[in-house]
Image (spheres, helix red, strand yellow):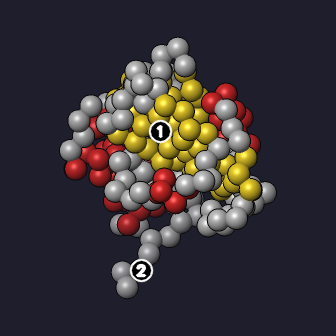
Amino acid sequence: MDLDAAQLSELNAALNEATLLNVRWNPGGGSFDVFLRVLTLPEEGPEPQDPRFVLRLTRVGRIVASLRMGNWDDERADVVPLALGDLTETVLSFRSQPIYGWELVDSENDDLATLVGRVSLDEAFPEGGRQHWIRLFQEGQAVRHLDLFIWFDNLEIYDMELAQIPIEYFAAGGRRWWNAFYAGDPRTEGHNMAPLRPD
């Protein structure tokens, strides 16, 4: 799957401040599901009652996780070993924390380099691909931090009825939400966020 710079920017905007609900590794199909509650707006009307989506990453080539018993910047925090089968329970244990940042997919920052010697899980799948990658994380609960990196070739998006959603449609909803948020649109109220001042 090819994503140009504009498509990548819109996709990242749609993922910013999403809530990570769960993950699921599907070994039979070599895919990885990411369950999210996102900030999105339709072209008209209020926020959807159910803003949950599933990102299905296919042709997964590598999965790396780091679960540490400390804050994200604590280089001396104990590292907890993980297996692929532990990822769902581990993410659920954080009780749905947000992910934030404008470069979650194909970031130019080499975040993984900061985790040398602090990796809980590193699995490679030669039959998969590494055209794209996504960084997910969870923090806060009982002073723990989880970083999760998945490399993949293709991305599919589904609603909770398992109807496939075009990536462009998903991204447009996120961009509308953020544009409305910065414009002071009351439809975006109730998320405990306020736009930064221009200065």
Describe the element under mark 2 as helix, strand or loop: loop
Badge 1 density bin: few <14, some 14–19, many ≥20, Cα 10 Å: many
Which of label 2 and label 1 is nearer to you? 1
Question: On the rendered structure, is 107 left or right of 21?
Answer: left
Q: Is residue 168 above or below residue 114?
A: above
**What whole-number distance in Å separates the C-alpha atoms at marks 2 and 1?**
34 Å
Image x and y of residue 96, in percent: 65, 46
Residue in the foreground of this view, choosing between 52 and 45: 52
From the viewer's perspective, is residue 44 above or below residue 188? above
Residue type at mark 2: give it: Arg
Q: Residues within 10 Å of mark 2 (few under 14, many from 20)?
A: few
Q: Residue at x 41, y 80 (%)?
A: 197
Front residue of 128/9: it is 128
Amino acid at pointer 1: Ile
35 shown above or below 46: above
Q: Residue at x 33, y 52 (%)?
A: 175
- When the figure is inspected, residue 116 is found, relative to residue 22, above or below; the finding is below
Would residue 117 be visible to someone looking at this image? yes
State the image coordinates of residue 28 (x, y, percent, origin top left). Answer: 52, 14
Image x and y of residue 177, in percent: 39, 53
Label ID, residue 113: none
Who's the residue at 51% across and 36% down the image? 63
Q: Residue at x 59, y 34 (%)?
A: 23
Q: Position of residue 170 (x, y in %)?
A: 36, 39
Quadrant for the N terminus in the image = top left
**Res 150 label:** 1
Q: Which residue is mark 2?
A: 197
Kindly tell me whether residue 138 is visible in this rendering. Answer: no
